[in-house]
Image: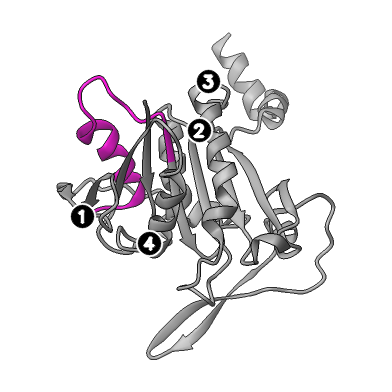
Amino acid sequence: MLRILITNDDGIDALGIKRLTEALLHLEDAEIYVVAPQEEKSGVGHGVTFRSALEPQKHDFYGLPVKAWAINGNPADCVKAAYHLLFEEGQKPDIVFSGINVGTNLGRDIYYSGTCSGAREAVILGVPGIALSYDNWFDQENYGEVVEMIQPLVKEFTEKAKSGQLPQQVFWNVNIPHLPLDEVKGVAPASLSLDHYIDKYSPEGGGYLLMREYPEGLPLSEPLDYDLLKNGYMAITPVHIDATDRTLLGQMEEWSFVKSSRKREG
């Protein structure tokens, strides 16, 4: 029996997490758990709760045949709580799916995104994690044919998790175009697009509201998630959680203050 954990950052009553659960219910020999924030937690990044107690509450999840809890915390809290508190002793999730997020998580969004933090926290705990986002920010109640789109994808991820073929230290960031199924051009491996929008602050009341601008015609040197998605592809990026730049690490051995410190030690 494969144990699947589902979380999100839009809250346990969001439509996207229901659609993700429906896609996973088609899998055979799967036991599904839903542990999600009791309210929306978009943009919280990888925040975890230290100064107040988490209180998991059992939740009737759309009448679907799953075990579900709402938690007064962030997506990373939900994965931690499920792993440490909610599974029976000796049992852990075999794979974690986070989403389906309202709107995309492309490029540097992965650092701000609660959806991505759910998948990242799974990997930190030694469990494969997949974050899924849907390009429907301006049509948020419409999830189109997303269930049919992702069924082959989630099936392959679960099969690879079951056979131990998914690498450690990597979570998978999936962005899905808001198109009819027959107009999706395919699934494409993608690099992160780090420059496809510019942050701007706009006056709002007595303060300033963060907005985004999307310049046209940026040069592309490789297949980037933003470009692929906007051209009709489902974009998938493997994101390594070890952010060490080992090339620079080696070069630092030649830095003067590093050399001088070595001499002092000698």
Quick check: marks 3 and 2 in contact, CB under 8 Å? no
Q: Which residue is mark 4?
A: 10
Query: In which quadrant is the C terminus drawn?
Result: top right
Taking the spot 48% from the left edge, 88% from the top edge, the residue there is: 203
Q: Which residue is mark 2?
A: 158
Q: What residue would you read off at disc 1?
A: 60
Q: Are marks 3 and 1 in contact (CB under 8 Å)?
A: no
As rendered, which of 216 and 28 lies closer to the eye? 28
Q: What is the distance, in whole Å, between disc 4 and disc 1 at their CAs? A: 17 Å
**Tag 3: residue type?**
Ser
Q: Characterize the local packing of mark 4: few (<14), some (14-19) or many (20 or more) Cα atoms within 10 angstroms.
A: many
- Pointer 3 residue: 163
Question: If you read the primary sequence from the N terminus, does the residue marked by circle 4 or circle 3 appear first?
Answer: 4
**Amino acid type of the residue that numbered disc 2 sits on in the rendered structure:** Thr
Q: Is the residue under label 1 in contact with that under label 4 (CB below 8 Å)?
A: no
Location of residue 243 by image quarter: top right
Q: Residue at x 59, y 43 (%)?
A: 152
In this view, the residue farthest toward the bottom is 205
Q: CA distance from mark 3 to mark 2?
A: 9 Å
| Nearer to us in this view, 75 or 18 | 18
| Residue 30 falls within the magenta-colored stretch | no
Which mark sits nearer the N-terminus, 1 or 2?
1
Residue visible at 23% across and 45% down in the picture: 50
Q: CA distance from mark 4 to mark 2?
A: 23 Å
Q: Which residues are magenta?
A: 71-96
Question: Mark 4 or mark 1: which comes first in sequence?
Answer: 4
Measured as percent of width and height from the top left, residue 20 is found at 44, 52
For label 2, the crowd category at 10 Å Cα-Cα, with few meaning under 14, some 14 to 19 and many 20 or more, is many
